[in-house]
Image (cartoon, grey):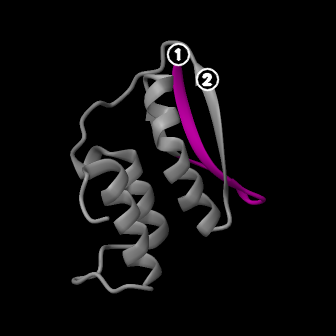
Amino acid sequence: MKVSVYFEAKAGAHMVAKFDEEETYMACLPTLETLATSKGYIVTESLEEGLEINTNTEPYDNPIHEAVQFYWGERCPEHEDGCPTCEAWKQYDSAFQGGVK
């Protein structure tokens, strides 16, 4: 089963990720919920059969990377504790790239 993930608010919903396995989605859900909550959104999802998934993990084709960049902006030149943008990218790195923790 395929899962499409959205960040939703009163104004509408924005798709932020697509997963081709529910197990992967469930592993990522806590980080998605933290990111959504910090921006005033909730996480919603839809389950679909036959959804085409882009498996390219390069940042320019990665929907999670694109969502973080859209909502939080470009990475700061250097990480600064307490900076909301830096903290969002830190969570992204921790969850999806095994980077900064």
Res 1 label: 1
Residue 84: x percent and y percent?
47, 79
- How far across and how far down the image is residue 62, in percent? 32, 45
Name the secondary structure under disc 1.
loop
Secondary structure category for the residue under label 2: strand
Q: Amino acid at mark 1?
A: Met
Could you give the CA–CA distance between mark 2 and mark 1, rounded to whole angstroms?
7 Å
Residue depicted at x 37% and y 77%: 86
Q: On the image, which quarter does residue 85 sit in?
A: bottom left
Residue at (44% x, 56% y) in the render: 67
- Count the marks: 2
Most extreme residue toward the right is: 10
Judged by its main secondary structure, the magenta piece is strand
Residue 18 at x, y = what percent? 46, 34
Q: Is 65 rendered above or below residue 48?
A: below
- In the rendered structure, which segment of residues is drawn in magenta? 1-15
Q: Which mark is residue 47?
A: 2
Residue 13 magenta: yes
At horizontal 43% and vertical 31% (from top left) the residue drawn is 24
- Do the residues bearing badges 2 and 1 touch, measured as CB atoms within 8 Å? yes
Q: In the rendered structure, which amino acid carries the disc numbered 2?
A: Leu
In the depicted view, which residue is nearer to us: 40 or 10? 40
Residue drawn at x 37%, y 58% is 92
Image spot of residue 3 (x, y percent): 54, 28
